[in-house]
Image (cartoon, rainbow, N blue to C red):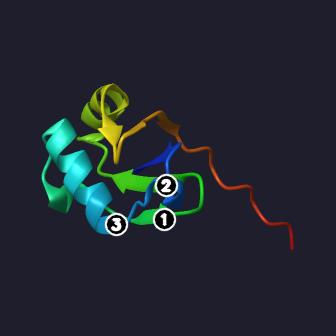
Amino acid sequence: MVRFFVNVGKNVNLTPKVVIEEVSNAVGISAKDIGKIDIFDNFMFMEVPTDVAPFVYEGLPHTRINGAKVNLEPAKPRPNKKK
């Protein structure tokens, strides 16, 4: 799975259902191809399988979700917690 950082979140009334519908329609992938979605106030993280990630990366920035222009980038790895 590839995890993307997306610049929209609850600030544009996103719900997992809206994300799945908008992304699958905009990019032309199956709703089943969208994995874990974490929505925060001003951004979200979304996972997709590696084989469809290029389609999401190329197609999603050319669309809007709930009227908001979308910018996305591969998410940075989480820092390791030191014990």
Q: Which badge, 1 or 3, is on the more N-terminal residue?
A: 3
Q: To which quarter of the image does residue 25 belong?
A: top left
Tell whether label 3 touches label 1 (CB within 8 Å). Answer: no
SS at circle 3: helix
**Residue, disc 3:** 16
Left or right: residue 41 compared with residue 73: right
Q: Looking at the image, which is closer to me, 72 or 68?
A: 68
Q: What amino acid does circle 2 point to?
A: Phe
Asked if residue 66 shows in the view, the reply is yes
Q: Looking at the image, which is closer to me, 39 or 75?
A: 39
**Residue, disc 2:** 45
Q: Is residue 24 above or below residue 41?
A: above
Determine crowd level at label 3: few under 14, some 14-19, many 20+ residues with C-alpha closer than 10 A: some
SS at circle 2: strand
Q: Which residue appears at 37% of the width and 66% of the height?
A: 15
Q: Residue 62, position in %: x, y?
A: 31, 25
Q: Looking at the image, which is closer to me, 11 or 27?
A: 11
Q: Is residue 48 above or below residue 54?
A: below
Disc on res. 38: 1
Q: Which badge, 1 or 2, is on the more N-terminal residue?
A: 1
Q: What amino acid does circle 3 point to?
A: Pro
Q: CA–CA distance between discs 1 and 2?
A: 5 Å
